[in-house]
Image (tube, rainbow, N blue to C red):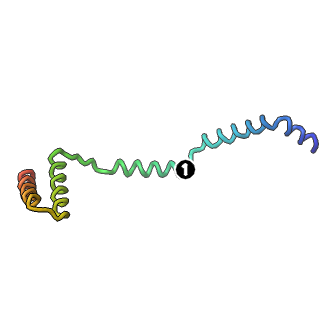
Amino acid sequence: MKKINEFIAQHYQKLMLFLLVVIFVNTCGNPNKQLTKKVETLSNKIDSLEIVTVTKKDLTIEGLKVEKRLIQSTDRKILDVNRQSEIDKELETLSK
């Protein structure tokens, strides 16, 4: 037992380095199966998503709708009523 303790005391740093290298190689060589499964599931979901193309016209229409909701949510004066009617006219022309 005394010889083993002396051996460990003399070669402690080398033994720790060896163990760390073994643990590192072991963990890097074995990928986590749950993680691999999750990655495959997510990539399948991404592949199944439809590609939505958004045009400048669509963005303009949505921007006008947001502006109209903003005006309606705030209590403002006659200028906002005029702007709401302008927005309605622009939405009609863009929807055609």
Relative height, residue 14 to residue 67 (above, below): above
The image quadrant where one finds the N terminus is top right
Q: Position of residue 90 (x, y in %)?
A: 8, 52
Q: Residue furthest front?
A: 77
Against 31, residue 95 (above or below) is: below
Task: Please give the residue where the numbered disc 1 appears in the rendered image.
Answer: 33
Q: Quadrant of residue 78?
A: bottom left
Q: How many marks?
A: 1
- Does 70 appear above or below 22? below
Left or right of residue 20, residue 38 in this image? left
Q: Amino acid at mark 1?
A: Lys
Horizontal relation, residue 90 to residue 33: left or right: left
Q: Residues within 10 Å of mark 1 (few under 14, many from 20)?
A: few
Q: Residue at x 69, y 37 (%)?
A: 21
Which residue is pictured at 60% across the width and 44% down the height? 30
Could you tell whether 95 is left or right of 22 in the image?
Answer: left
- At 94% from the left edge and 42% from the top edge, which residue is drawn? 2
Q: Position of residue 71 (x, y in %)?
A: 16, 60
21 on left or right of 63? right
Between residues 14 and 60, which one lies in front from this camera angle? Answer: 60
Secondary element under disc 1, as helix, strand or loop, is helix
> Which is nearer the eye, 71 or 92?
71
Residue nearer the viewer, 53 or 95: 95
Residue 86, percent across and down? 7, 55
Whole-percent x and y of residue 89? 5, 55
The quadrant where residue 74 appears: bottom left
Q: Residue at the right extreme?
A: 2
